[in-house]
Image: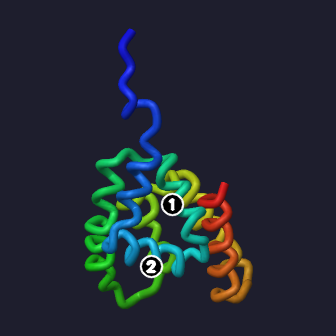
Amino acid sequence: MVTYIYENDLREMKLIILSSPLHEVTMAALCEKYGVRRQVLRKKMISLFDMSLLENIPARYEVWENEQTETEKTVESVFGASLITRQIPLLTDDEMNSIIQQTNDKISAGCNKEQAINEGITMIREVICS
């Protein structure tokens, strides 16, 4: 059976993609939004995504950013739910829906909205870092 060297481990090539100037800007924005260290986010992306998706991350982020024209700030928009489930799928739909539901339940129970959202961001960070 023939095996090719490049099929064995693509992590270095993926890291080169994520180190480009356009990717650095997007990575910085994602890290700031979710409070994740850059190395942790890179490691997660390298393990989850193929090279094609990695190359398109800046464009996907830009598309999401341009769609953010809502004046009403829902929990979904504050979390960037479509960003991290569809555009840059770091979380599954089920994981995101669970976090949104828990956050909405806390708000409905009388918890401060800002505090509930911060706790939701913490839950998102935990899923990304796991």
Residue identified by numbered label 1: 42
Q: For residue 110, what is the image quadrant?
A: bottom right
Residue furthest to the front in view is: 5
Q: In this view, does 43 lie above or below 118?
A: above
Q: In this view, does 46 lie above or below 36?
A: above
10 Å neighbourhood of mark 1: few (<14), some, or many (≥20)? some
Rendered image: mark on residue 29: 2
**x and y percentages locating residue 9 in the rendered image:** 46, 37
93 left or right of 3 in image: right
User: Considering the numbered disc 2 on the image, is that residue within a helix, a strand or a loop?
Assistant: helix
Quarter of the N terminus within the rendering: top left
Q: Along the polypeptide, which appears first: circle 1 or circle 2?
A: 2
Real-space Cα separation, disc 1 to disc 2, in angstroms: 13 Å
Q: For residue 8, what is the image quadrant?
A: top left
Residue at 47% x, 74% y is: 30
10 Å neighbourhood of mark 2: few (<14), some, or many (≥20)? few
Q: For residue 27, what is the image quadrant?
A: bottom left
Residue at 33% x, 62% y is: 57
112 left or right of 38 in image: right
**x and y percentages locating residue 50 in the rendered image:** 38, 45
